[in-house]
Image (cartoon, rainbow, N blue to C red):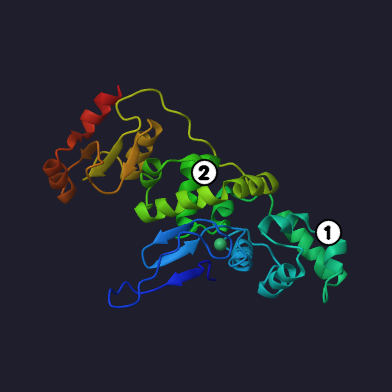
Amino acid sequence: IPKIIKVLTHERDESQVKYERPSLCPVCQSELLDEGVLLKCQNLECEARVVNSIIYFASKACLNIDGLGNKIVETLFASGLVKSVIDLFGLTLEQLLSLEGFKEKKSQNILNSLENAKGSEYWRFVNSLGIEHVGEVASKSLSEVFGSSFIDASKEEIVLVDGIGEEMAESILEFVRVNREIILNLEAVLKPMKPLKRVEAQDNPFKGRVVVLTGTMSESRGVIKELLESFGAKVSGSVSKKTDYLIYGEDAGSKYDKAINLGVECLTEIDMKNKIK
Ligand SMILES: [Zn+2]
């Protein structure tokens, strides 16, 4: 399902006529997400993308709303009853029955499915928004790390989340900037389950630090990762300039070499446990 509306594409070729790159969507005037070749409107209520955004919203990996297929969404939009996702939740039986081809049973089923979409898992809510580049996996990570405060996360905080890079972070920030009110209103209507908030760790040397694990330790990587996370560390998969500590076990390989090269502090498992004490 395309959730991208290509507003303007042109080759960057100096021999061609130069265009003024628009910064605003020609349809809704909201500021565009500039991704080099593509400019994308991020406004959830933009007419140019609203039908697709509703179809995506209702799809299986999102809120899984039975009965809201393409044709029905198009009919609802054309009727003027649904101008954006949130309008779905204000639909009444009378309104649906007034549309051609909407019998009582079908209409009631749609209303029931919409009701059932409330209280979903939080990541489904995030996924359903259709943020550019953000799919199921990233929605789950965002939900786990930030819960409903993902809309207040900074770029620095977002790129620390496993599997989320610069481009995705930019896209999240732009999406939230344009759609903040809509997200809050939708959340108030849908009441998705809040993921459990991670308990704030007390001050310790690992709190808020980026840690990478490598080599064989006395316990599995997963156990050590959980231990460190309970102390507020962010455990990352690869060594970079952002890494604060590398914790290494036996047979540490390239990550160890890279950490040494970058001047990252390297600790053995015992060093780590001593620091925690
Ligand atoms: Zn637009």
Left or right of 241: which side holds 128? right
From the viewer's perspective, is residue 26 above or below residue 153? below
**Which of the 4 image quadrants contains residue 235?**
top left
Nearest to the observer: residue 237 or residue 6: 6
Residue contact between numbered discs 2 and 1, judged by CB atoms under 8 Å: no
- How many marks the image carries: the answer is 2
How busy is the neighbourhood of tag 1: few (under 14 within 10 Å), some, or many (20 plus)? few
Label 1 sits on residue: 92
Q: Residue at x 69, y 72 (%)?
A: 74
**Which of the 4 image quadrants contains residue 29?**
bottom right
**Which of the 4 image quadrants contains residue 20?**
bottom left
Res 119 visible: no
Left or right of 217: which side holds 233? right
From the viewer's perspective, is residue 89 above or below residue 105? above
Q: Residue at x 66, y 73 (%)?
A: 70
- The amino acid marked with disc number 2 is Ile
Is label 2's Cβ within 8 Å of ligand 1?
A: no
Mark 1 element type? loop
Q: CA distance from mark 2 to mark 1?
A: 31 Å
Quadrant of picture, ligand 1: bottom right
- The amino acid marked with disc number 1 is Thr
Res 123 visible: yes
Residue 143 in percent (x, y) is at 51, 46
Residue 127 in percent (x, y) is at 54, 56
Q: Residue at x 46, y 48 (%)?
A: 173
Nearest to the observer: residue 76 or residue 68: 76
Q: Quadrant of the C terminus?
A: top left
Q: Residue 151 bears which disc, if any?
A: 2
